[in-house]
Image (spheres, rainbow, N blue to C red):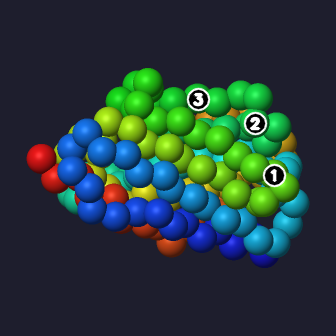
């Protein structure tokens, strides 16, 4: 069983930065494609960014491109999300998710088998 635990959320002002972490346990992290998703109040959960098992391939939602950066450290079983130039519209619960089998990054939530509990990010204007 794979467990994912996010951390690093908080309350910041517009323009500030945050770095989220997602620590994985169980299974073989280096074979997982990882994704970050978010859910704002009253909205459906949406894809933010994903990174391939090797770290060589990433894919960003247009809304965060140029502001957010995903990375991973397979030695630490951790994936990171560096969020810069935060905006009030980035306010959401952020979830990390794992897709098995060394597969390409995709935006489809149902393809990600394991999910963390989420961490709240609130950006004030």
> Mark 1 and mark 2: span between their CA atoms?
9 Å
Q: Secondary structure at mark 2?
A: loop
| Whether residue 75 can be seen here | yes
Residue in view at x 81 percent, y 51 percent = 74
Residue that label 2 marks: 55
> Mark 1 and mark 3: span between their CA atoms?
18 Å
| Whether residue 111 can be seen here | no
Q: Nearer the viewer, residue 112 or 54?
A: 54
- Closer to the N terminus: mark 1 or mark 3? 3
Q: Are marks 2 and 3 in contact (CB under 8 Å)?
A: no
Relative image position of residue 14 (x, y in whole percent):
21, 44
Image quarter where the N terminus lies is bottom right
Q: Secondary structure at mark 3?
A: strand
Residue in view at x 71 percent, y 28 percent = 57
- Closer to the N terminus: mark 1 or mark 2? 2
Residue that label 3 marks: 59
Relative image position of residue 70 (x, y in whole percent):
58, 40
Crowding at dot 3, Cα within 10 Å, few <14 / some 14-19 / many 20+, comes out as some
Mark 2 or 3, which is nearer the eye?
2
Residue that label 1 marks: 74
Q: Is residue 1 left or right of residue 49?
A: right
In the rendered image of this protein, does residue 122 appear above or below residue 64?
below
Mark 1 or 3, which is nearer the eye?
1
> Mark 2 and mark 3: span between their CA atoms?
11 Å
In the rendered image of this protein, does residue 62 appear above or below residue 125?
above
Residue in view at x 84 percent, y 55 percent = 75
In the rendered image of this protein, does residue 40 appear above or below residue 83?
below
Relative image position of residue 3 (x, y in whole percent):
69, 73
In the rendered image of this protein, does residue 18 appear above or below residue 15?
below
Q: Are marks 1 and 2 in contact (CB under 8 Å)?
A: yes
Q: Secondary structure at mark 1?
A: loop
């Amino acid at each position: 069983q794979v467990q994912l635990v996010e951390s690093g959320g908080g309350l910041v002002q517009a323009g500030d930065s945050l770095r989220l972490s997602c620590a994985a346990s169980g299974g073989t992290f280096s074979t997982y494609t990882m994704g970050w998703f978010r859910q704002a109040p009253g909205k459906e959960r949406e894809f933010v960014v994903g990174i391939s098992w090797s770290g060589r391939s990433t894919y960003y939602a247009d809304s965060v491109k140029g502001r957010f950066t995903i990375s991973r450290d397979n030695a630490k079983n951790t994936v990171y999300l560096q969020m810069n130039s935060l905006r009030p519209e980035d306010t959401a619960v952020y979830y990390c998710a794992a897709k098995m089998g060394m597969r390409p990054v995709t935006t489809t939530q149902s393809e990600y088998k394991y999910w963390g509990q989420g961490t709240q990010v609130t950006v004030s204007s």
